[in-house]
Image (cartoon, rainbow, N blue to C red):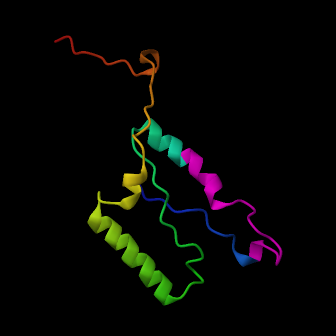
Amino acid sequence: MCGWSPPQAAPKRLTTRRATTAIFFDAFLPAYEQSFVVCGMRFLPPLVLHGAHRVGKEAVTQHVETFSQRLQSYPAWPELDELGPCPACMVPMTDRPVEHQDTD
């Protein structure tokens, strides 16, 4: 499991009424997904509570409950059943680190 925090909105003093980040959250995911593939891991869509600073206590509580349930039920997650096999990332031998053997 990998935890990370998505980009946050800019403080009000740095934006205008019309300003937006203009970048959708999904635009940040390909780099993370590729990193997972290189490490031989599967990438699952993140569990994100958008606008957490504006939602009510009930929404935060529900999000925490969902996250807690996921942690307790791992690895029996429905998303894992929908995934195909983990993609292979073939690294040529010439690109791998050289292992040094002790000559004692």
Q: Please give the name of the residue rendered at 45% of the width and 24% of the height, measured from the top-left corner.
A: 91
Give the farthest residue toward the top. 103
Q: Please give the name of the residue rendered at 40% of the width and 40% of the height, measured from the top-left corner.
A: 86
In terms of depth relative to the viewer, which is nearer, 85 or 96?
A: 85
Give the farthest residue toward the bottom. 57
Q: Please give the name of the residue rendered at 32% of the width and 19% of the height, measured from the top-left corner.
A: 99
Give the farthest residue toward the left. 104
Q: Is residue 30 left or right of residue 45?
A: right
Q: Is residue 3 magenta?
A: no
In terms of depth relative to the viewer, which is nearer, 13 or 44?
A: 44
Q: Is residue 18 magenta?
A: yes
Indicate the quadrant containing the N terminus: top left, top right, bottom left or bottom right: bottom left
| Residue 1 in view | no
Seen in the picture, residue 1 relative to 94 is either above or below; the reply is: below
The percent coordinates of residue 12 (x first, y second) are 73, 77
Q: Please give the name of the residue rendered at 82% of the width and 78% of the height, measured from the top-left corner.
A: 17
Q: Is residue 17 left or right of residue 24?
A: right
The percent coordinates of residue 25 (x first, y second) are 63, 60
Indicate the quadrant containing the C terminus: top left, top right, bottom left or bottom right: top left
Seen in the picture, residue 89 relative to 84 is either above or below; the reply is: above
User: Which of the 4 quarters of the picture holds residue 66?
Assistant: bottom left
In terms of depth relative to the viewer, which is nearer, 44 or 1?
A: 44
User: Which of the 4 quarters of the picture holds residue 38?
Assistant: top left
In terms of depth relative to the viewer, which is nearer, 38 or 74?
A: 74
The percent coordinates of residue 48 (x first, y second) are 51, 68
| Residue 86 in view | yes
Q: Is residue 9 left or right of residue 92?
A: right
The percent coordinates of residue 21 (x first, y second) are 73, 64
The segment highlighted magenta reads 13-31
